[in-house]
Image (tube, rainbow, N blue to C red):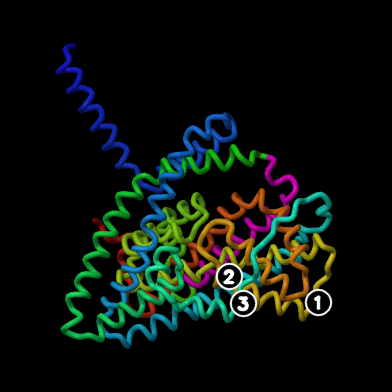
Amino acid sequence: MDAACRAWFLGNAGVTILRGWFAITLWKRVVAGLVLGALLGAVWPDAAPAVKIIGDLFVRLIKMLVVPVVLITIAAGIAGLGDPRRLGPIGGRTIGLFAFTTLIAVSLGMGVGLLVRPGEGIALAGVAPHVLGAAVSPSDQLLSIVPANIIEALAKGDMLAIIFTAILLGIGSVLAGEAGKPVVALLQGLAAVLMHIVRIVMEATPFGVFALIANAVAANGAAVFVNVGWLALCVIVGSLAQMLVVHAGLIALVARLPVVRFFRGIVDALAIAFSTASSSATLPVALRVAHDNLGVARPVASTVLPLGAAIGKDGTAMYVGLLGQFALQALGVIPDAQMLVVMLATGALAAFGTAPVPSASLFMLAAMLSAVGVAPEQTALVVGLVLPFDRLLDMTRTVPSASANLTVATLVAHAESALDEARFRGRVVE
């Protein structure tokens, strides 16, 4: 076979392979990446660092998109509503639903912790304390929503400040009337371009997930949960309960939609949430599946989902509640009713203010425990015990946060008559 024939054959073989690859549903490719990454990390851990750069590049691609996606999609979503009065019902429903699911999640985490008691018998002697920064007060969290410098907020990725700025930009564009129409068109055009960029980046997901999981398993190994196995079990039980009872209940009873179709439609977002352990990094694919699979109108999805990435932290809320009980049990403290109420309130507030990045909830533990009189040094001991094992726990608890975000988006769209039920039920063929 001469060179020209070989080139033709290889070229056609490559095209066939690529067509076959893209013919497989994205979530199936992601699951394959998860399984292969776990096998590589367990069977050949020394090889995991060689693929680490793939995972790092994937995470950087995701993070690169987060700030522009949040700023542009919220502003474009509000501008796309047309009537600024609609922001009131959408914003009110969104915040109210997230507050409800967050309180339930904290209560659930505390309940599982009190029932299973995973912290009993944990030896803190010899554990190196991990010093935490000062807990952020509710007043400071409130002040941080309004940025002193918009450019600085964008550079630092301060999500609450960015969301506040985007809301003002969207409202201002609508209220400007005719003069604001070019800005509205620009925002909507930028949002459309960003979504296409997101689609391109998401095609790299199976490779990024493969590398991330391989390194997580190689670094922690199968014995990672020996000392905190009960805590891990509680995280899994709490996450599943929040999704299969709370979220599924809201979809079935409030929206009256099929639960199986809902979870089938969001599986891509849940896989990204698990592999990246970041609600923020999950946002781009959540926006895609909300419209393409669930039938949520783009203006509603673009308003609710970025807001949810900042405050919709059911997994974090559940974990903070659970970890608070774990810490008290490890320290030998028996909480009374008043302490439990205080922990419930501070846990919910802490979850709302947690940055959408991996392991951020550990640093919110100080706010909850200090509210019930636990010294920072004792909190540092507990964090020092949990921190080495937190990555896989973080990956698990990020899944219900992503599920909560898409649940609320679906409920709000249903309430606003902005849900394409035919698409949700899989009756729309692209």
**Residue 217 picture location, percent across and down:** 59, 40
Separation of residues labelled 2 and 1 (CA atoms): 22 Å
* Tag 2–tag 1 contact (CB < 8 Å): no
Measuring from the top left, give residue 50's x and y in whole percent: 49, 32
Q: Position of residue 378 (x, y in %)?
A: 78, 63
Could one spot residue 421 in this view of the protein? no
In front: mark 3 or mark 2? 3
Q: Position of residue 95 (x, y in %)?
A: 47, 79
- Of 224 and 412, nearer the camera is 224
Q: For the residues marked 3 and 1, what is the alpha-carbon distance in whole angstroms?
A: 23 Å
| Mark carried by residue 165 | none
CA distance for labels 3 and 2: 13 Å
Is 375 situated left or right of 409 in this image?
right
Q: Residue at x 64, y 39 (%)?
A: 221
Q: Which residue is mark 2?
A: 351
Majority secondary structure of magenta residues: helix
| CB contact under 8 Å: marks 3 and 1 | no
Q: Amino acid at mark 3?
A: Ser
Residue indicated by mark 1: 336
Q: Residue furthest bottom?
A: 85
Number of the front mark, 3 or 1? 3
Amino acid under label 2? Ala
Badge 2 or badge 1: first in the primary sequence: 1
Which one is nearer the viewer's eye here, 299 or 32? Answer: 299
Q: Which residues are magenta?
A: 223-251
Select label 2 or label 1 by which is in front.
Answer: 2
The answer to whether residue 251 is left or right of residue 202 is right
Q: Is residue 261 magenta?
A: no
Task: Specify whether 207 is left or right of 122.
Answer: left
Mark 3 neighbour class, 10 Å CA radius: few under 14, some 14 to 19, many 20 or more: few
